[in-house]
Amino acid sequence: MAQIEKVKFVWRIVDLVLAGIFIYAGAIKAFDPIRFASDIDNYKILQWTIATGLAFYLPWLEILCGVALIVRRLYLGGLSILTALISIFIIATIAAKVRGLDITCGCFGHASQNWSFPAHLAVDLAILAALLALYFKAASGNRLENAV
Amino acid sequence: MRQALILAALALLPGIGQAIYFRDKVSWQSPIPASEMVTVAQARTWDGNAIWVDARPDAEFERDHVPDAVPLNEDRWNELLPQFLVTWSPEKRVVVYCSSQSCNASREVARRLRGEAQLKDVFVLQGGWEEWLKSRK
């Protein structure tokens, strides 16, 4: 029983760490949406108008999904969105690298500005792995509950 | 899926609110308003009345740059800004350039000069260094 509690505790910590990361990343971008629009534009995938719209929208989406992980309301929805966002971001980053673009994602403000490409990718992949683990754990938990 | 849609819809509210708040501070048509851009031909007419700022990385600046240009990139912003300010005077216009039309550095440096250094008359060179090279031929 104590073992189960310990495992639950560890998963909760993962929840909170991920939530903290996305709330922090979202807040930094929400404070300076113009800079974030410029960062999105840097990828040369979207038109400026769309980049601007996303710069106002995505930070709040990240923050709300982070909050959903903390309060465990709309939990699976939050996990799905964050998994989709980080996956798109990883693909866009790799595509930008392949195209030789000099990009600054600005994901974590100035803290991440000098990260190398492999460091960025390693952090993003670790976040993606943690999100997927949480998603499958939660989804399988829901299935068990429904079965009972 | 329903949960994700609810979250996506909820995030629209603060997003739209913030877009309304920033409506006068951001251009939805172009990253740089036309009034803050300058062509090579225009900038050349300013002659001695302009300071050229090279926002490219140090290595590129050292390879070649616009005559009398001052290096000011984001990598060494704190170090280079005081050096730039020594050459600056209020009556001079500032022309910031980076490598090409698609680069972002000149836009960022111009934005920081306007915001952090409170400078007016800061312009981004259309087409950047590539355009300058073409005009030199």
Image (tube, coloured by chain):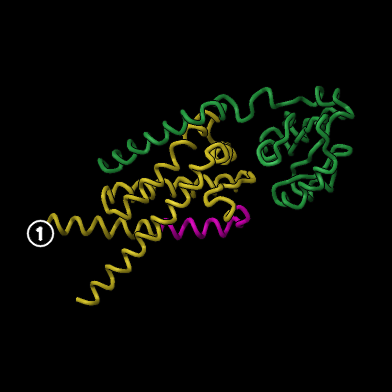
Q: Residue at x 27, y 54 (%)?
A: A72
Residue B18 horizontal side relative to residue B2, left or right: right
Q: Is residue B105 visible?
A: no
Q: Quadrant of the N terminus of chain B?
A: top left
Which x, y percent locates residue B45?
86, 22
Instruction: Verify whether residue B80 appears in magenta.
Output: no
Residue B88 horizontal side relative to residue B14, left or right: right
Please report the bounds of the magenta region as a residue range: A113-129
Query: Which chain does tag 1 point to?
Result: A
Magenta segment main secondary structure: helix
Task: Report the residue marked by disc 1.
Answer: A148
Which x, y percent locates residue A119?
56, 60
Chain letter matching colour yellow: A
**What residue occupies the far left of the structure in this picture?**
A148
Q: Residue at x 80, y 43 (%)?
A: B85
**Secondary structure type for disc 1:** loop
Q: Nearer the viewer, residue B121 or A55?
A: B121
Residue A101 horizontal side relative to residue A58, left or right: right
